[in-house]
Image (cartoon, rainbow, N blue to C red):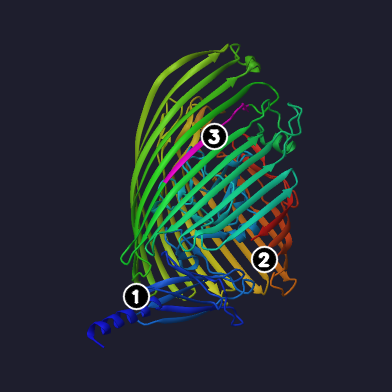
Amino acid sequence: MNKYTLLFLSLFMASHLLAQNLKGTVKNQAGVGLSGASILLLNSSQGSTADKDGTFSLNLKAGKYQVQFSAVGYATKIQQVEITNTTIALEVTLLDNTQTLGEVVITADKVEANLQKTPLAVTSLNAKQLEEYRVWTINDLTALAPSTFTVEHGNSTGSSFLNIRGSMGFSNDQAVATYVDGVYQFDYFSAPLNFSNIERVEILRGPQGTLYGRNAFGGVLNVITKRPNNKTSGFAEIDLGNYGQQRYSAGFNTPLIKDKLFINAGFQSNGRGAIYDNPTLNTKDFDKHNAYIGNVNLKYIVSDKWTIDLNTRYENDKDKGAYPWSATDSIARANPYTVYGNWDNTERRTNFNTSAAVKYFGNNFNFTSITSFVDYHIWLPGRFDFDFSPAELISFTTWSKQNQWTQELRFSSPANTSALKWTVGSFLFGEKSKNSSTTYFDKDYALFDPNAPYASIGNGKRNAYGVAFFGQATYAITPKFDITVGARYDIEHRELTQNSAFETGGVVMPLTTDSTAKKTFNAFTPKVILSQKLTENSIIYGSYAKGFRVGGFNFGNAANPTYNPEKSDNYEVGVKNTFLNNRLKINLTAFYFQQKDQQVSTSQDGINYATLNVGDMDNYGLELEASALPVKNLQIDWTASTSHSEYKKLELFDAASNTVINYKGNKAINNPALQSMLAVQYGLPLSKSAQNLKAFVRGELRYIGEYQLDFVNAYHQDAYSMINARAGVTSNHFDVAIWARNLSDVRYMAFGYGSYMMGTPRMWGITLTGKL
């Protein structure tokens, strides 16, 4: 045998050994191999699927890795593996998900990580949990994460907003940033969405400006639709209920080219009949909701180092009877679900999102490029009643069209990382929008102004662009002690061009010609986290983070054309624990949140109303998340939070004294002093067949403490409790469930800031699901 033959054999053997340097078997508790089990290397394109005996192999470079093991019906497990020059053999046992809590992977820090080992206050709800809680929109998220409250603002999909830790204000930009598949939802009314074909929802509490940027002021809602993979699967679902509820959903996943190209697509059509009646229009069919949503996600694995993801989502909403407001708190409570306006209040929305994510997974760094485009349109095809009475006094119509594009470039440490983990990047965006609003002073307004009827018209267009640079690094000073330091610098330029007109007798007369206001905003948002591993299953951390909500323009207001950014400081201490072989999880967080220069819609003279920076608010509280499996098939989940808010400054106009009063000491709006959600579910296997037929029953008790309905604290909603229930049968291919929300039909005020609206009454229905 010559030297060339020996060299060839040596290289062949070396490559053969390298190709199998991580081998293993995934088994159940009985020692049976789990065919089809999924093995994923976090922060990498690499993965594998177990064969019929449960065995797998991966080709990895030397280093430390986080590997996720999962299978249908079993609790997910995340295991750290250290690869050397020798072959590593693993034997992984997955336990039934009725016996242990699964470990959760999140992307809250824009890298894949184990939830319980990430020093952040974040809640993750997967597809199964969203189904169990019957989460259809963000309206259903209240108390599912601590300090998280949804304001049901207007009986339409686009008019509900999240309040986290008391941070919600009333301005044209969000206090809680919403991302869908990495695409930021710029507009205040584009952020709420119908949940369709969702893989998971992440709720990050506290400012997240370092990695998420503008308007991640009080937190972030991260919505991730289902990711394409190498398995063929699908589902079809029908939901039917009272008030004419109808919801039809379907989704499908399959490889187009095995191991290379995959597609996941989903579609949903949903509708709801009338809750409100309107004696003025002589109808008991005042409000109806209809929407359809579709998404298509493609994933292409170019090589073991390169992947391309293309995500597209479209939503079209038609909400008749939006904003069924009453003029006073007492009228709304005395006549629940009755309105008296003269118009049908129809609101229309379309929202198109598309993005391309190119990812590189290297030996020295990972790289991600995300390019996105958003086309958003909202309009009232008719009029909206603005006096909330049978009289024809004031009505309103508006439309807005917006386009945004973004480009994010991000470099991060590789999967086989050392003691240093890091992320650096840049974010660039451009925005164009047009809008027009008309306020009608109708015929009955002649009682106050003999010139009525007439109309006031305002038109505007806005251009904005911005750039940000960010970085975050975590260094393990010791094997148990980490320090994380991050910072971001944002600069954003905005321009608003507007004009106004007056209409009477069908003749439009210009009042003002085009005038342009310009404003440049910038912000520096640092973050520091200290994290100590107490045991293998417990960590404690302390953090500081700064938040930033961008300033803007007051449309049609010459006296106060712009308002300044809002800022926040957040101090946090948390502990995360997993006990009893993953059968008990307890996370506890204490926070102190400071809002400065809060943006409030108010006046300083009683005539010119605008968004002004007139508030400084402090809030502190405790947050608890707990999950337990005390016995097989019984799961208990509990979230709870306290909130102690107080304004240090709140300068508002008082009409009675015709002066500006400082309402120092008032409580924050829409911020419950205490809230809690307790969920208990018990499952009962009905057979030992391969279909895994099980019955289940579930009960939820939601408690919402007292909260203020206005900044003056003149009106509030008393504490109330709400019961939700669900029961049914599940199997591998078919599920049926009956459910009820607000079972005791409790009446509560959902919105009350100058106008008032009751919350959703008792809803019940049935869900039928078929699975492929």
Which class describes the residues within 10 Å of circle 2: few (<14), some (14-19), or many (20+)?
some
Front-most of 708 and 402? 402
Above or below: residue 55 compared with residue 553: below
Q: Secondary structure at mark 2?
A: loop
Q: Earlier in the sequence, mark 3 or mark 2?
A: 3
Front-most of 721 and 614? 721
Number of the front mark, 3 or 2 = 2
Q: Earlier in the sequence, mark 3 or mark 1?
A: 1
Q: Start and end of the magenta stretch?
A: 372-386
The quadrant in which residue 3 appears is: bottom left
- Say which mark, if any, is on residue 732: 2
Q: Position of residue 661 (x, y in %)?
A: 50, 34
Front-most of 208 and 314? 314
Q: Position of residue 654 (x, y in %)?
A: 54, 31
Is 205 inside the magenta-drawn segment? no
Q: CA distance from mark 1 to mark 2?
A: 39 Å
Q: Which residue is mark 3?
A: 378
Q: Which residue is mark 1?
A: 62
**Residue at (65%, 68%) from the top-left corner?**
635
Q: Earlier in the sequence, mark 1 or mark 2?
A: 1
On screen, residue 550 versus residue 683, left or right, reads left
Is 374 inside the magenta-drawn segment? yes
Which class describes the residues within 10 Å of circle 1: few (<14), some (14-19), or many (20+)?
some
Q: Position of residue 482 (x, y in %)?
A: 37, 69
Q: CA distance from mark 3 to mark 2?
A: 41 Å
